[in-house]
Image (cartoon, rainbow, N blue to C red):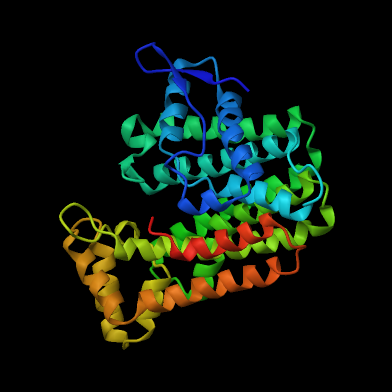
Amino acid sequence: MDIIQIQAMKGNTKRVESGTNKRCPDVYNSFPKEVRDALNKFETFFRKSLFSDSPLLNEVIKYIFDRHGKKIRPACVFLSAMASAPSEPFINDKTFAGTAAIEMVHTASIVHDDVVDRSDQRRGNKSVNAEWTSRIAVLAGDYLMAKALVLITEYQMFDFMNIMSYPIAEMSVGEMIQIEKSIALDTTEEIYFEIIRKKTAVLIGASMEVGAKSSGASHLAETMYRIGENVGMAFQIKDDIFDYEKTNLLGKPTGNDVVENKITLPLIYALKQVDNKRQKEILKCVKHSSTDRKYISTVRDFVLENDGLTYATSVAEKYVEKAIDMISILDDSPAKQSLISLARYVTKRNE
């Protein structure tokens, strides 16, 4: 595939190189060469699939994907495809198209989430709604979602429609539950797990399922989905731990979840360790953190003092072990070992 061109803001056309570049985690270097090559080719396929007649839209899409993250979902698709059918050619047009559709849905969801949460930052950069406007962000997210459906139709992957439609619905429901609970501030551990399953885990599960089906291993589709779902649960818990660990340039906790009144697993556990009076004091800090960020440090210190991060880490590791137990039933192959490495990376990563 050729390197594609995307229109830049001032009307210039810039070439966009593809590849598993510095944005990818080190663990990707241990993947089989076939998977690394597929990730390289996928980058170009993906960007080419999104090119439109609108210079502004192309600029927004370029902005998003110059800053997009670890490509864990494409990695899951290709590793799943190869591990499911290690003796067969595992990459075909449907594999690329299915991977692109998954990544489009994921990216649309985070662009929309930033609008809903009124977030100004995404991975240390301005969010789309902050760089442009909420209206442009919503339209860009809509375009990404629509293009996913176009790809499914274009490549006649109608058997993928159920795989794709379920996560889309679940992510919307998960976001609504999270909004409701951010108002009530009464998220329980059970509700938290349901939120992150819907918002994160189901799409990583779908990535693994797409991989199995695209390589012709439909008999392993359900198993691969469950592997991905467990990896996704651990992935999101680790992200929620980061919110209490990472600091800004002044050395203060970022606390984005706290500012948005999201009660995640570290805080849920910490609250259960204290009496009702102390719970109310901490929840009051959470409630007012959006208008006065001095409360973030109070909440973070409370979580650390009550072993919230230790507990959340142990839960994330249990989900990883569940995934590895299921991976163990697969035939031995380099892709199988890479799936195990990827699962372990999820809780060991530093970003």
Q: Position of residue 185 (x, y in %)?
A: 38, 68
Q: Position of residue 122 (x, y in %)?
A: 36, 44
User: Depth check: 333 or 15 in front?
Assistant: 333
Q: Height in image: 10 above or below 277?
A: above
Please name the residue shown 53% across and 65% down the image: 344
Q: Height in image: 61 above or below 316?
A: above
Please name the residue shown 58% across and 31% down the image: 46
Quarter containing the N terminus:
top right
Q: Position of residue 145 (x, y in %)?
A: 59, 36
Left-right relation of 23 to 18: left
Q: Quadrant of residue 259?
A: bottom left
Left-right relation of 227 to 112: right
Q: Height in image: 98 above or below 232?
A: above
User: Depth check: 185 or 143 in front?
Assistant: 143
Q: Height in image: 271 above or below 141?
A: below
Please name the residue shown 40% across and 18% down the image: 8
User: Depth check: 225 or 299 in front?
Assistant: 225
Left-right relation of 214 to 123: right
